[in-house]
Amino acid sequence: MNINTICLFLLVIAAYLNLYLAFNKKKQKNKAKLPISSKEWREKVEDKNLQLWISNRERLKDKRKGNINQQY
């Protein structure tokens, strides 16, 4: 084998290795750690929705009582 062939072969291996490492680095960058897990977020939203539902229910009960008292 010629020295030029060996150098070319090593250069091709280095280029593919560089491409592989760059791809893995970019792939790892996209995986960001979120400050809150999806389970915690869902629980937070459900709690908020429950509190809104309770307050709306109480408000509607008060309106119904007011309407009933006005009719009589």
Image (cartoon, grey):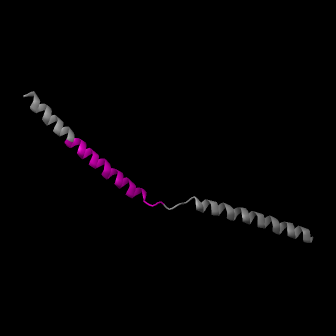
Considering every residue shown, the one lying at the far left of the view is 72
Residue 14's quadrant in the figure?
bottom right
User: Magenta region's main secondary structure?
Assistant: helix
User: Is residue 66 rendered to the left or right of residue 52?
Assistant: left
Q: Quadrant of the N terminus?
A: bottom right
Question: Between residues 27 and 5, which one lies in front from this camera angle?
Answer: 27
User: Is residue 53 rendered to the left or right of residue 15?
Assistant: left
Considering every residue shown, the one lying at the far top of the view is 71
Indicate whether residue 22 is drawn in magenta. Answer: no
Magenta stretch in the rendered image: 34-58
Residue 21's quadrant in the figure?
bottom right
User: Is residue 46 rendered to the left or right of residue 30?
Assistant: left
What residue appears at the point 42 percent right and 56 percent down from the top-left corner?
38
Percent coordinates x, y for residue 11 in the rendering? 82, 66
Percent coordinates x, y for residue 5 in the rendering? 89, 67
What residue appears at the point 9 percent right and 32 percent down from the top-left corner?
69
Considering every residue shown, the one lying at the far right of the view is 2
Question: Between residues 22 and 35, which one lies in front from this camera angle?
Answer: 35
Indicate whether residue 46 is drawn in magenta. Answer: yes
What residue appears at the point 57 percent right and 58 percent down from the top-left corner?
30
What residue appears at the point 63 percent right and 60 percent down from the top-left corner?
26
Q: Is residue 50 above or below residue 25?
A: above
